[in-house]
Amino acid sequence: MWVKKIVFSSILLLAALTSNAQDQEENKGPWSGNTTLGYLATSGNTESKSANFEFGVNYDLVRWHHGLSGRFFSSSQDNDATAENYQLSWSSKYDFSEFNYGVGRLNWQRDRFSSYDYQRFATLAYGRRIIKNKKHELDAEIGGGWSQSKNIVNEDISEAIFRLYGEYDWQITDTSKFSQTIQVSAGSSNTFTEAVTSLRLAIVGSLGLAVSFTYQNNSDVVPGKKKTDTITSIGLDYEF
């Protein structure tokens, strides 16, 4: 019941914020971001619920670009939890030129039903803006760093990693945008791969509909656990 109240209140808040989106457009500053909220419930012979919440906040200066993002997803069936995933990420970029930059990233995630209690990554990388125009943007990064994780049999794993990251954005129309990110963090014990595909369709003002599909894979898991997890989510998205 509390989830329904939060979702309903958030929808009303998003609608209220959208009413003054025009004023915000006229007073743009270094801050920008978005938040997405979704909820789905079924009843009858089977009762199921799922909820997802995502946010991203960016602070852009002339050469520096900072970003904080997070995600929460949960689902249950017949009052038994079937999925629960948390993620939090921080990045700081410094532009060497229009197309070259350096970036530091911190990533933390916890998946209650995966092979790992938690996974943490700290990396430094060189980035290149391969494509940058009004319709398309493509960035690629290569670097390395350190990872720490703990699996569900209480084994602590700490190792150096090699990291690849790519991001593609396509502004299809004024009201629709396609995005794709992929990251690979490879160490001697485990290789973690994540790909996120998303589509945003504007509804009115800054309010839109967001659909995303997340693929996650760990090359090394404990017996009885699958290597791959996927998350499909849909929700209302507000940009500011």
Image (cartoon, helix red, strand yellow):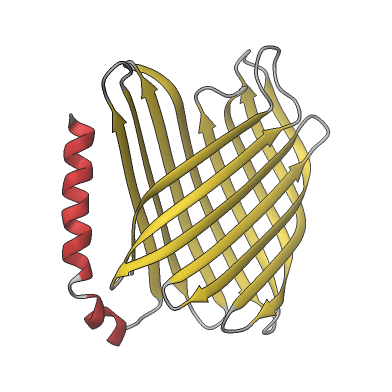
**Image check: 22 left or right of 64?**
left
At 73% from the left and 62% from the top, the residue drawn is: 141
Q: Position of residue 191 (x, y in %)?
A: 76, 37
Name the foreground residue: 45 vs 18: 45
Q: Would you identify the image quadrant in which residue 72 lies?
A: top left
The answer to whether residue 201 of the structure is visible from this angle is yes
225 above or below 206? above
Number of marks = 0
Specify the quadrant that holds the C terminus.
Answer: bottom left
Q: Position of residue 99 (x, y in %)?
A: 70, 80
Residue lying furthest bottom in this view?
Answer: 26
The answer to whether residue 27 of the structure is visible from this angle is no
Q: Position of residue 235 (x, y in %)?
A: 36, 50
Q: Position of residue 206 (x, y in %)?
A: 31, 70
Residue lying furthest front in this view?
Answer: 45
182 above or below 116? below
Specify the quadrant that holds the N terminus.
Answer: top left
152 above or below 27? above
Q: Would you identify the image quadrant in which residue 115 lies?
A: top right
**Image check: 90 left or right of 95?**
left
Residue lying furthest right in this view?
Answer: 188
At 50% from the left and 68% from the top, the residue drawn is: 177
At 67% from the left and 18% from the top, the residue drawn is: 155
